[in-house]
Amino acid sequence: MKKFTSVHDAGEVQPLVRHAIEIKNGSGAPNIGKGKTLGLFFMNPSLRTRLSTQKAAYNLGMDVISMNLNQDGWKIEFDHGTIMDGDSQEHIKDAVKVMSSYCDVIGVRTFASLENKEKDYNEEILNAFVQYSEAPVISLESATRHPLQSLADLVTIEELKISKPKVVVSWAPHPKSLPQAVPNSFLEWISHTDAEVVLTHPEGYGLSPTFTEGISITHNQKEAFKDADVIYVKSWSSFEKYGENNGEFRDWVINEEKMRLTNEAHFMHCLPIRRNVIATDGVIDESMIYTQAKNREYAAQAVLEKIVKGL
Amino acid sequence: MKKFTSVHDAGEVQPLVRHAIEIKNGSGAPNIGKGKTLGLFFMNPSLRTRLSTQKAAYNLGMDVISMNLNQDGWKIEFDHGTIMDGDSQEHIKDAVKVMSSYCDVIGVRTFASLENKEKDYNEEILNAFVQYSEAPVISLESATRHPLQSLADLVTIEELKISKPKVVVSWAPHPKSLPQAVPNSFLEWISHTDAEVVLTHPEGYGLSPTFTEGISITHNQKEAFKDADVIYVKSWSSFEKYGENNGEFRDWVINEEKMRLTNEAHFMHCLPIRRNVIATDGVIDESMIYTQAKNREYAAQAVLEKIVKGL
Amino acid sequence: MKKFTSVHDAGEVQPLVRHAIEIKNGSGAPNIGKGKTLGLFFMNPSLRTRLSTQKAAYNLGMDVISMNLNQDGWKIEFDHGTIMDGDSQEHIKDAVKVMSSYCDVIGVRTFASLENKEKDYNEEILNAFVQYSEAPVISLESATRHPLQSLADLVTIEELKISKPKVVVSWAPHPKSLPQAVPNSFLEWISHTDAEVVLTHPEGYGLSPTFTEGISITHNQKEAFKDADVIYVKSWSSFEKYGENNGEFRDWVINEEKMRLTNEAHFMHCLPIRRNVIATDGVIDESMIYTQAKNREYAAQAVLEKIVKGL
């Protein structure tokens, strides 16, 4: 594996999912990363990703260097040919070439602007890292995808051992505009399993057609929940009216009543979760969220192991 | 040891103090922490605690993940049942469960608001960590106690080899309102030794009765200093008029003249210290402060070793 | 080696340069730092220095503690005898004694105020670290020098294998006032080689005579470039009118036309570089900048190895 930025880099999905479960069950390769350094570069806050990826690297015997790019380093220029006479102090090309030259593997956390759809969906920042890095690049979430989260989600669902589960991806309300990276990425990964997938969201909150092609979509949340085995929840802002979320549709909150419509479904959410806005305390406290989060460690370890083996 | 938040978690105090001294003298267990990860989570600035605890973990062969919670992560909600529709992005329950799931031991640094006595003295934040953590929790200072500092202080006093020392805990002036954690905690720990303890402070700067029960108190600083073997100094704000410190009582500064009233006493302070406000340069430069600080490493190592052995 | 703050601490320069190249070629001492801790303390942003020094320490088997002093710790007082009644919370003397007591080697990154020439050129902060540290001190750039950069630069030039190269140090334009540390330090180090050195800058941008003694200086950039083998470029503010840079002399930018005046010279710059202000994209993309940056790792490793051997 030379990079890990989406399901398309993962090779066969099922073996990778099963390997993460094997690692969870104790069959890791504890010294494979000995003498190798993982560099983790963050452009926005992160808790689970920061901790789980660092722990996964330690599990493999790797050293880790962690950096908040905008805070510990210089202001970065992303455009080409610019006369760099303003605020930005270093070009992304130079920063990435240098940073990656000190590391055996790098991870980078970027984010959607939610202002410029083209820039976001072209993954300008992540792609600059992939283009200029001298080391393999792992996405720690990018503008449009969150592949380590999705892999952990697939591990979590696989552990449920439900044959052909009905997995419902539901939009939920939120006071702020959030990226589409998590649902995009989950849809991309879940389509590599035997799950039946239904996507439900209010009108105006559709995702990019690239990610929903061939997936059943309904604006009737309760209808969607019927017979569901997994309710995968996330808030996101509009793709069409890019980045918009007017804070409406509060009745899309996931509560116990709605969960009773399902086939005793498991509630999943990637965290952080705003309690009693996205879902009620009662739903969250009976959910898979902590298992999902813990599986981030094994997902990261499976990916790192595969990358380190290829060095 | 399943947690370390106060002297009540320490088991017998004297053996722990003696073990820290043994570690200082070279009898540590350098590989006991191999393959174990310590997570350090800070909610306010820290220098000694950050460095000494990390070094102690390295001495045991542990890996360390360090995080400034409010800066590198999300804004945290502490209340229960809240509709999380405002600034805070993640509930403490979810954050702690997840953070601790990636670590074998966690340390957390919280702080007193000095605005809400009840919240502070109920240790709401520290207790949430203890309640929700899946790993043992070490307090790296909390709203009302600083047990690793107190243990290091007892090590420092033990090394003086004075039988039944007279230990005077003296308030000192300071331009800002400071927590009561250090004196509270020191009084709690020193009462497990053979020391004679005297507490001296201006009227209005009494500590919580919980911590001063059975301790001799005087408002006459010079009287208190007579025959003292150890002068343990700290500024703190009022417990009664909670958090108040009007910057008065500048003449409570510790100077050479006052030190001459003692039995050639050793001056102790936990650092950071404001020179020529808390005490004069002359007093500080002849003091135990650097020994105290260095003993933080051995105190942390003794506690970590005991916790790791119990994993 | 007890400290590394300038070329004067380096012992013989050529053997150190050659040892860094040997390390690059694979003859490092991977376990010499085992059980030793390097503390890295930053007072301003840093990318290359932070990463390369940490990687060098890992290469030697060391543990690393990294801290942003003003952000993660307390506000520091530098003056002596002050009544510390204002903003600063801890005296540099106390902070350094304590920080260094937890580490086997420390590195510190300070910076020029560019406001007070005397304070800057007296290296008040770096010298306080050297004075009070209980462990050897490595400068990670100071107010007036950047010795790890200079050592990496000498490694880069040595690898070119040019006998008696003509090395031109050229000023370049920049929108902001920058320190003189890099050119000062480079001149100090390059004078220990067989290179012929020419310094060129606009009138008013001379460096301190301490660093330019015996070096040929011209205000005619094009004249200087003739027959050059290495063009070493940096912007700096005026030493005479201390810290001034009015943003003029834009025509001092290094472009392809000027490079054609040279003996197919190699362009060097320490990074970060403002593209199309300091030099054009065309010049930068054909330059030695990434080699220089990568050599920072081997320079740091050579210095750390020498210091660790002396512990």
Image (tube, coloured by chain):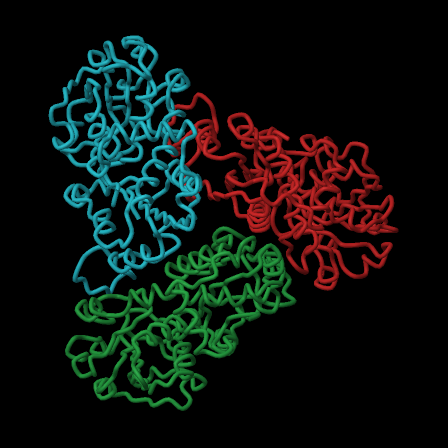
Chain colours: A cyan, B red, C green
In the image, taking residue C100 as reference, residue A280 lies left or right, namely left
Taking the image as shown, residue C11 lies to the left or right of residue B192, namely left
| Quadrant in which residue A213 is drawn | top left
- Identify whether C70 is placed above or below C82: above
Q: Residue at x 72, y 49 (%)?
A: B233
Q: Quadrant of the N terminus of chain B?
A: top right
Q: Is residue A48 left or right of residue B214?
A: left
- Residue B113 pos. (x, y %): 56, 38
> How many numbered marks are there?
0
Q: Can residue B102 be seen here?
A: yes
Residue B74 visible within the image: no
Q: Residue C47 falls in which quadrant of the image?
A: bottom left
Q: Residue at x 25, y 74 (%)?
A: C267
Looking at the rendering, in which quadrant would you find the C terminus of chain B? top right
B129 vs A120: above or below = above
- Return the x and y of residue C134 as percentages of the image width and height: 62, 63
Q: Residue furthest front?
A: C27
Where's residue B209, x and y in %?
A: 73, 32
Q: Nearer the viewer, residue B264 or C248?
A: B264
Between residues A191 and C194, which one lies in front from this camera angle? C194
Rendering quarter of residue A178: top left
Q: Is residue C176 left or right of residue A200?
A: right
C54, above or below A255, in the image: below
Instruction: Looking at the picture, tell me which residue is in the foreground, C132 or B171.
Output: C132
How far across and how far down the image is residue B87, in percent?
A: 38, 34
- Measured along the vertical axis of the image, is residue C45 above or below residue B78? below
